[in-house]
Amino acid sequence: MQLDSHTTWATGYQVTVTGPHVRFTPVVVSHDDRRGKQWTELPLPAPDFKMRSNTIAGSSTHDAWVFGDREPTTGRILAEHWDGAHWASTPIEPPPGELYDLNLLGSSAPRPDSAWAVGAASIVTGRTPGPNGGTIINTRTAGLIEHWDGSAWHRMSADGIDGDWWLNSVTEIARDDVWAVGNTAAPDDKPVLLHYDGQAWSRVAAPAFTGLAGEYQSVAASGPKDVWVVGRTILADKDRGHPLVAHFDGRTWTTVQAPEGVAGKLWSVTAVPGGMATVGWDPSGAQDRPIGFRYTHGRWQNLDLSVTGYEDVSYLAVVAAPDNRLTALGTGSTPKSQDYQPLALTGRG
């Protein structure tokens, strides 16, 4: 996220494998372009965190949030606030019932008295004996919408969605104008588009698109008449995905024709003057290949996101600075090491 004209923050997690055990440790890093190219870690307060950090949002360097998963052994949900000097945990109560999993995947925090975190919770609905012994845990998955009002978190509901579903991203334009996006689970596997009017959340019909299935991964806006959504569509049974883009002009949602001949999924979008920029990756080959585009004034421009010496590269986030710079954030490996390393690429496209 871009906190001011010079400061960019990002979040992710470190993966540590010890024998059969896998540990996730959340990480937050900061970059100030007045101090060179170096990124600096902002250590979270509790070293016993054992969950992923999935999303970051904030209004300034004195008001930032990090959200992630629920830690299974303690039940703690990662929701940390930065006030400019210290991190503080802000408890989010889990939904009722026996939880199998909970993940906060997207966030928006335009003001100190308003922050949103969205994701999904999997609730245990029963257990059945497995065919080869053991137990099969049956679950249902429902989207989560959490809102911070300046003093506490409150859960909100959204009606009109059947079956399993989840939310991936949210953006607040105004107190009465908030968008959230995600998708339903297979076999339906269709985009989910929600709007908050200051009173309640409601589902909005997604625009028609080409494909057997589709999902919305990220939403961004420059204002109430300029909202962008990106994700992927599945064109055939064995298709790994093709870019899916939609735009709202204040009245109507319309699917935007993606660049021809491009495969892959778009994972993140940010608003820029005259349009948007988006990044993701193409998983259809032997290795992931980065993809990224700027779409302004009705024209697509390819962003060269390749990194010399790295392979299997995918970009998970893109942020825009006021001077039209873009920063793409992701991961990649090298021929000498299959361990994934963080990547940050900055340019003007």
Image (tube, grey):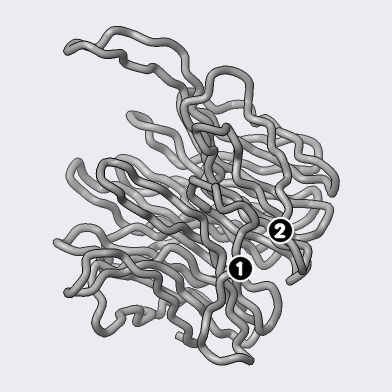
Q: Is residue 155 left or right of residue 12?
A: right
Pick whichever, 147 or 249, lies toward us.
147
Q: CA distance from mark 2 to mark 1?
A: 9 Å
Q: State the residue at coordinates (66%, 84%).
A: 6
Above or below — where is 202 with respect to 51?
above
Q: Which residue is mark 1?
A: 42
Above or below — where is 134 with respect to 99?
above
> Can you see residue 275?
no
Query: Which image quarter: residue 336?
Result: bottom left
Above or below — where is 178 with respect to 324?
above
Q: Is residue 222 left or right of residue 38?
A: right
Q: Amino acid at mark 2?
A: Trp
> Can you see residue 117?
yes
Report x, y in % for residue 135: 30, 13
Identify the residue at the far left of this view: 286
Q: Mark 2 near mark 1, Cβ–Cβ under 8 Å?
A: yes
Which quarter shows the N terminus? bottom right
Query: Which image quarter: residue 313?
Result: bottom left
Q: State the residue at coordinates (63%, 29%).
A: 94
Q: Amino acid at mark 1?
A: Leu
Report x, y in % for residue 66: 62, 55
Identify the residue at the far top of this view: 129
Q: State the residue at coordinates (61%, 59%).
A: 44
Which quarter shows the C terminus? bottom left
Report x, y in % for residue 68: 55, 47
Q: Which residue is mark 2?
A: 87
